Image (cartoon, rainbow, N blue to C red):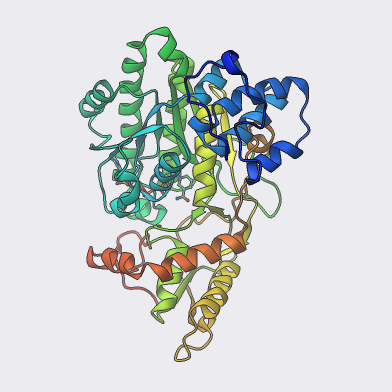
């Protein structure tokens, strides 16, 4: 394999042929060889290839796609092509840890993770990334504005990806206060600290800076049998959780509009994958099914969710942060709709195949219908056309392949579920307000 050039080498001094920097036997080398691109894109491809060693393979194709569409500006290319220091909030959580693993693995960016390490945090999910010299951790609560200002001054990040939140709908029904304090007041604190920090930067650093707020499709409310959430769908949140996220989205919009803070926003559908707290449907069903416990399905099981594998979301977040247009929102979703009941049947079949247990027989016998969630939204489904057209993003996992990978991960990591049980959560039903720790209904 020929060697990629040093990041700072002068392009014009020894201009390589387009393929000279690549291993032509590699998948990406073959793609370059086969791909027919127009002149403008080729010129851009030269630049992108020079930076391949900095940004990783993924970035090359994304940038090339955007260049072909003529949708990214010089500033955005610069943003994409040079390593940055990114402050991630909530990076010890389910999605935040997937994002940090992705950033450390696929880019040369540095990451500062700030997290309060609530019950939902998974420091173990960051074990490998934490060994990298490009990773730093700050144990900070976003409810503390002073601490946020200190961290920004200390680390001097080039951007922020904000995921820290109380994120579990059933808990928001039992105790909305934490959701108001973290999701609304905490986001206000972060915006306020980010604004002061942004205004202290010189113009070059301001041009690179982005504040990316990570939100949910639940802000749009509930769909009927037809239709999809687009970026233009009006907000109609129905749970304390989604109302708190909607509030934080509005604050982000206002900080961009009023103070010119360069923000981008993404709204994603339901995620699943490794390290998800077992209060959520998929890990709860896997862990209960493995132990032969009842599989509690809310209501009639016909509520529809649009599922996205967490690593696909991490890639999407990386792209929105680097290439999203200021002031824009991007819907992220997998076009993987399933009713809760169908999903649980699929999980049972997957477990029966990967971990057969003759004593239990077919695990679908464990399915039990229980009292519905209060105000349970009927259907969510995302139209992610803007992500595809503008940023060239597509999910890589189907629901089938993503579930196989997820189930296999839970089978391979039994110790993780035990540690959550030891910490006090053992699949109890939440969200029956006033009955927060009721036993799992049979
Ligand atoms: N899980 C999903 O399906 C989904 C879908 C779309 C959007 N989102 C959004 O993505 C983000 C991350 O979701 P997740 O599923 O990874 O959540 P999570 O509950 O797994 O993780 C949240 C993380 O934030 C940290 N945190 C909580 N309160 C904090 C505070 N006050 N200060 C600092 N850190 C705090 C926790 O310790 C935890 O590490 C959230 O903003 C959520 O609204 C989630």
Q: Which one is nearer the viewer's eye here, 380 or 395?
A: 395
**Residue 240 against residue 68 in the figure, above or below:** below
Quadrant of res 320:
top right
Q: Can residue 372 be seen?
A: no
Residue at (45% x, 30% y) in the render: 212
Q: Where is residue 318 in the image (x, y as percent from the top left)?
A: 50, 36
Q: Where is residue 17 in the image (x, y as percent from the top left)?
A: 67, 26
* Ligand 1 found in image quarter: top left
Quadrant (top left, top right, bottom left, bottom right) of the C terminus: bottom left
**Residue 368 against residue 229 in the figure, above or below:** below
With 167 as the anchor, is 23 left or right in this view?
A: right
Q: Position of residue 20 (x, y in %)?
A: 63, 31
Q: Position of residue 360 (x, y in %)?
A: 46, 88
Quadrant (top left, top right, bottom left, bottom right) of the N terminus: top right
**Residue 45 against residue 240 in the figure, above or below:** above
Q: Which one is nearer the viewer's eye here, 208 or 259?
A: 208
Q: Which residue lies furthest to the top in this view?
A: 203
With 187 as the anchor, is 227 left or right in this view?
A: right
With 316 as the anchor, is 144 left or right in this view?
A: left
């Amino acid at each position: 394999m020929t060697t990629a050039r040093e990041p700072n080498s002068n392009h014009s001094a020894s201009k390589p042929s387009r393929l000279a920097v690549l291993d032509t036997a590699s998948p990406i080398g073959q793609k370059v060889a086969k791909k027919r691109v127009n002149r403008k894109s080729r010129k851009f491809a030269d630049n992108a290839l020079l930076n391949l060693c900095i940004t990783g393979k993924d970035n090359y194709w994304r940038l090339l796609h955007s260049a072909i569409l003529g949708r990214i500006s010089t500033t955005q290319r610069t943003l994409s092509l040079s390593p940055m220091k990114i402050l991630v909030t909530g990076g010890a959580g389910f999605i935040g840890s997937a994002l940090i693993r992705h950033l450390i693995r696929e880019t040369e960016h540095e990451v500062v993770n700030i997290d309060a390490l609530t019950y939902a945090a998974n420091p173990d999910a960051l074990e490998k990334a934490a060994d990298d010299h490009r990773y730093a951790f700050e144990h900070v609560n976003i409810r503390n504005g002073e601490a946020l200002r200190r961290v920004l001054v200390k680390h001097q990040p080039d951007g922020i990806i904000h995921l820290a939140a109380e994120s579990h709908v059933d808990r928001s029904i039992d105790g909305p206060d934490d959701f108001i304090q973290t999701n609304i007041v905490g986001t206000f604190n972060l915006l306020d600290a980010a604004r002061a920090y942004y205004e202290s930067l010189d113009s070059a650093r301001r041009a690179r800076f982005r504040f990316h707020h990570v939100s949910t499709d639940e802000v749009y409310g509930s769909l009927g049998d037809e239709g999809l959430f687009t970026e233009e769908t009006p907000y109609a949140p129905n749970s304390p959780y989604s109302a708190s996220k909607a509030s934080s989205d509005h604050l982000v919009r206002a900080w961009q509009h009023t103070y010119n803070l360069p923000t981008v926003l993404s709204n994603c559908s339901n995620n699943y994958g490794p390290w998800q707290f077992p209060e959520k449907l998929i890990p709860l069903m896997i862990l209960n099914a493995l132990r032969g416990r009842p599989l509690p399905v809310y209501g009639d099981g016909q509520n529809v969710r649009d599922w996205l594998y967490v690593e696909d979301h991490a890639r999407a977040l990386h792209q929105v942060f680097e290439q999203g247009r200021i002031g824009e929102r991007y819907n992220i979703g997998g076009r993987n709709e399933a009713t809760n009941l169908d999903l649980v049947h699929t999980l049972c079949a997957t477990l029966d195949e990967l971990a057969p247990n003759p004593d239990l027989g077919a695990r679908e016998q464990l399915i039990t219908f229980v009292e519905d969630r209060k105000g349970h939204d009927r259907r969510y489904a995302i139209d992610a056309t803007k992500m595809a057209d503008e940023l060239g993003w597509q999910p890589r996992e189907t629901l089938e392949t993503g579930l196989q990978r997820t189930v296999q991960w839970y089978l391979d990591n039994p110790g993780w579920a035990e540690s959550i049980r030891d910490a006090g959560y053992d699949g109890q039903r939440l969200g029956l307000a006033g009955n927060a720790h009721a036993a799992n209904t049979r």
